[in-house]
């Protein structure tokens, strides 16, 4: 069973060997496709219970404590990977949570982020779950009826050149075997006319449409202190700017570091960002 955005809605076929589509989801442009009639009858009830966008106004909700059901929605079509020379930006997984917690609880990281020092029991719902939900356009935190407005990537080394350098002040040390940070994109658009509409095929806006609507992307990012000072974030932002400009067609990008984060401010200046204001 797979889920992806479709430009046209289709009705279920009677042929047992042909793919079948949930007609309710297809009606709201989020087609859920079953491989054949047997698959359809075996899975349609759990689909209607857990993830039918047509029955939930195109806003999907996974109940607290049942987060593994997110994998029912996070199909390959929702997951994007971007590679740079040394790093990979990939979809966040539930198995990343312990490493996410280690970063979110680190005082060095806390001082450079607007979220401050989150209580450890709240980290799963504040961050891990929200990062995974951002993969699914119809999940509320992924955009709901506005379409996909958020991308949160896990940062993972793909080269042996990326090695942890134990930071003396880090609370918990991380190795290079998995998640070492994240990079997120939030998209804002001043025009509701570009959003998907129930019952109508959705076509991604053109670059001119997005420019006229004042669309822009905001970047946020963090790395565990063991991986600071290696030029990794410069490499990541350069890689993701290509995705924003060339794939998403967003005309402008904003970074908003806290005023005391001089390293992030210098990074933005090196990459050609212009200062437009401060608080």
Image: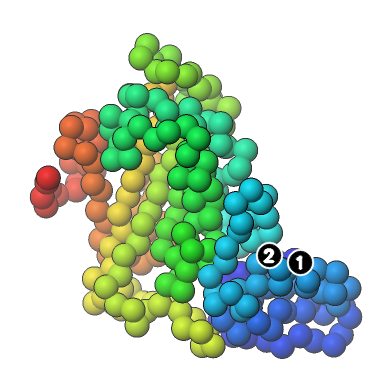
In this rendering, position of residue 226 left or right of residue 192: right
In this rendering, position of residue 190 left or right of residue 172: left
The quadrant in which residue 230 appears is top left
Residue tagged by mark 2?
50
Residue tagged by mark 1?
46
Q: Position of residue 218 (x, y in %)?
A: 30, 54
Q: Is residue 131 above or below residue 160?
A: below
Q: Is residue 240 above or below residue 43?
A: above
In the image, 169 versus 116, the foreground residue is 116
- Residues tagged 1 and 2 counted as in contact (Cβ below 8 A): yes
Q: Position of residue 50 (x, y in %)?
A: 68, 65
- Residue 33 visible from this viewpoint: yes
In the image, 173 versus 19, the foreground residue is 173
Q: Quadrant of the N terminus?
A: bottom right
The residue drawn where x is 69% and y is 83% is: 23
The residue drawn where x is 61% and y is 58% is: 62
Q: Position of residue 202 (x, y in %)?
A: 49, 81
């Amino acid at each position: 069973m797979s889920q992806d955005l479709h430009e046209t809605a289709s009705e279920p076929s009677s042929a047992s060997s042909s793919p079948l589509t949930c007609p309710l989801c297809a009606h709201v442009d989020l087609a859920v496709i079953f491989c054949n009639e047997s698959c359809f009858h075996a899975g349609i009830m759990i689909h209607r219970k857990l993830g039918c966008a047509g029955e939930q106004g195109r806003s999907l909700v996974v109940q607290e404590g049942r987060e593994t059901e997110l994998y029912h929605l996070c199909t390959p079509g929702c997951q994007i990977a971007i590679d740079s020379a040394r790093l990979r930006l990939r979809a966040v997984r539930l198995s990343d949570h312990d490493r996410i917690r280690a970063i979110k609880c680190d005082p060095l990281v806390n001082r450079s982020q607007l979220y401050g020092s989150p209580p450890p029991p709240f980290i799963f719902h504040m961050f891990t779950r929200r990062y995974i939900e951002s993969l699914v356009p119809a999940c509320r935190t992924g955009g709901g009826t506005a379409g996909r407005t958020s991308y949160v990537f896990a940062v993972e080394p793909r080269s042996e050149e990326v090695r942890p350098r134990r930071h003396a002040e880090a609370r918990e040390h991380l190795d290079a075997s998995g998640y070492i940070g994240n990079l997120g994109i939030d998209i804002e658009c001043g025009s509701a006319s570009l959003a998907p509409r129930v019952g109508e095929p959705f076509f991604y806006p053109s670059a001119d449409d997005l420019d006229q609507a004042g669309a822009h992307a905001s970047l946020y990012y963090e790395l565990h202190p063991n991986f600071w000072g290696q030029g990794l974030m410069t490499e990541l932002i350069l890689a993701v700017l290509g995705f924003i400009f060339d794939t998403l067609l967003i005309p402008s990008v904003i970074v908003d570091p806290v005023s005391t984060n001089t390293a992030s401010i210098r990074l933005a200046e090196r990459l050609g960002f212009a200062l437009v204001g401060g608080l």
